[in-house]
């Protein structure tokens, strides 16, 4: 009898082990933006490639638009293993490393090409590992693009922003940037911005054209200014412990899928942003272009923020970022 029970138990154990190894690994990818944005498209491409490269071995579930976790919860969910990939904007890692604040310094990067050069240079690549001691591993950078400003009035010179309330991401640099202008920053989750603009909890915001359009900010903001004063890019991060325990073939397949998704992201980001800009221009909202002199004024007004954060970021990183503007690899 005992022998029978023992045998039955081992058959059950074998069956369980068999089914467990046959079941695909479920990989949850959570993000906060709409599907028709650079990140939304790239996450879908990652799913497609991963499932093609690892048929039956991996199932990727993509959750856009804060459906699964919003800004406040996604890092915690990743740490707990409730989700395996997230791609927060670089501004949202403030709590975990000060080094990534380099991406938030206003007017540090001239354009997205300079950001790209910095990310692919040695300093940018090293930053992918800046949060490993906290259990997070960066696998790739994904572009969105340069940020613009919007409000319920034209913002043409820095004093136009004085006294206004601006939504910012959870970043001390971005908060300081608006304080520098005599404005009042309010840290808010992305999912809450439309309503805050509609209700007047905040008067303005900064974001890329594709994020502005996909969130319909043109319905609740009368004026947009093409300032390109900073960048919204992403780091795709995973849980280091989970990643290191993956079988090597799965890890290699996911890495390859990530490379493909990164290419797609970076190919479509520029176009999605310029299309979104055109759609905002065609809406009832106005889009203002700055003269060179006006842009210089914004730069002069915001740049003092750099000195405040140089200690945490490191002078070397700031220098490398500056160098990326002149085309030289950092
Ligand atoms: C995102 O692009 O992921 C959202 C950025 C934001 O919170 O403004």
Image (spheres, grey):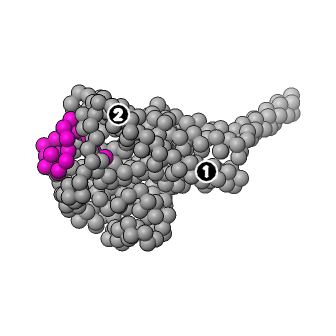
Badge 1 density bin: few <14, some 14–19, many ≥20, Cα 10 Å: some
Q: Is residue 230 visible?
A: yes
In this view, the residue in front, 38 or 172, is: 38
Residue at 29% over, 30% down = 284
In this view, the residue in front, 164 or 112, is: 112
Pointer 1 or 2: first along the chain: 1
Q: Position of residue 193 (x, y in %)?
A: 31, 34
Could you say whether the residue bearing mark 2 is in a helix, strand or loop? loop
Which residues are the magenta region? 148-165
- Compared to 111, does 315 lie above or below? below
Q: Position of residue 49 (x, y in %)?
A: 65, 44
In this view, the residue in front, 316 or 146, is: 146
Is 221 left, or right, of 131 in this rendering? left
Residue at 46% over, 42% down = 272
Q: Quadrant of residue 32?
A: top left
Could you give the CA–CA distance between mark 1 and mark 2, rounded to whole angstroms? Answer: 33 Å
Q: Position of residue 83 (x, y in %)?
A: 53, 40
| Mark 2, residue position | 282
| Mark 1, residue position | 260
Q: Is residue 124 visible?
A: no
Is 256 left, or right, of 166 in this rendering? right
Q: Kindly tell me whether mark 1's CB lies below 8 Å from ligand 1.
A: no
Q: Mark 1 vs mark 2: give the one in front.
A: 2
Q: Is residue 94 magenta?
A: no
């Amino acid at each position: 009898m005992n022998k029978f029970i023992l045998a039955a138990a081992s058959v059950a154990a074998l069956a369980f082990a068999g089914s467990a190894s046959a079941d695909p690994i479920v990989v949850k990818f959570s993000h906060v933006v709409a599907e028709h944005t650079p990140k939304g498209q790239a996450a879908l491409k990652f799913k497609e490639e991963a499932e093609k490269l690892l048929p039956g071995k991996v199932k990727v579930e993509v959750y856009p638009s804060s459906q699964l976790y919003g800004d406040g919860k996604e890092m915690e969910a990743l740490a707990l293993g409730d989700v395996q990939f997230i791609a927060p904007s670089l501004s949202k890692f403030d709590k975990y490393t000060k080094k990534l604040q380099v991406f938030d310094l206003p007017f540090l990067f001239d354009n997205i090409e300079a950001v790209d050069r910095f990310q692919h240079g040695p300093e940018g690549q090293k930053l992918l590992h800046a949060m490993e001691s906290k259990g997070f591993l960066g696998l790739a950078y994904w572009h969105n693009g340069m940020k613009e400003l919007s409000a319920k009035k034209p913002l043409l010179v820095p004093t136009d922003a004085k006294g206004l309330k601006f939504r910012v991401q959870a970043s001390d640099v971005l908060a300081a940037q608006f304080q520098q202008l005599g404005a009042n920053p309010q840290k808010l989750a992305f999912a809450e911005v439309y309503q805050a603009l509609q209700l007047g909890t905040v008067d303005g915001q900064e974001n890329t054209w594709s994020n502005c359009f996909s969130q319909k900010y043109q319905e609740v903001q009368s004026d947009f200014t093409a300032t390109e004063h900073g960048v919204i890019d992403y780091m795709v991060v995973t849980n280091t412990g989970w990643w290191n325990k993956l079988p090597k073939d799965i890890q290699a397949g996911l890495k390859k899928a990530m490379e493909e998704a990164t290419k797609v992201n970076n190919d479509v980001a520029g176009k999605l942003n310029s299309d979104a800009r055109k759609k905002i221009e065609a809406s009832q909202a106005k889009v203002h272009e700055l003269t060179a002199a006006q842009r210089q004024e914004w730069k002069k007004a915001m740049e003092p923020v750099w000195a405040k954060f140089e200690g945490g970021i490191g002078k070397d990183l700031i220098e490398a970022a500056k160098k990326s503007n002149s085309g030289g690899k950092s």
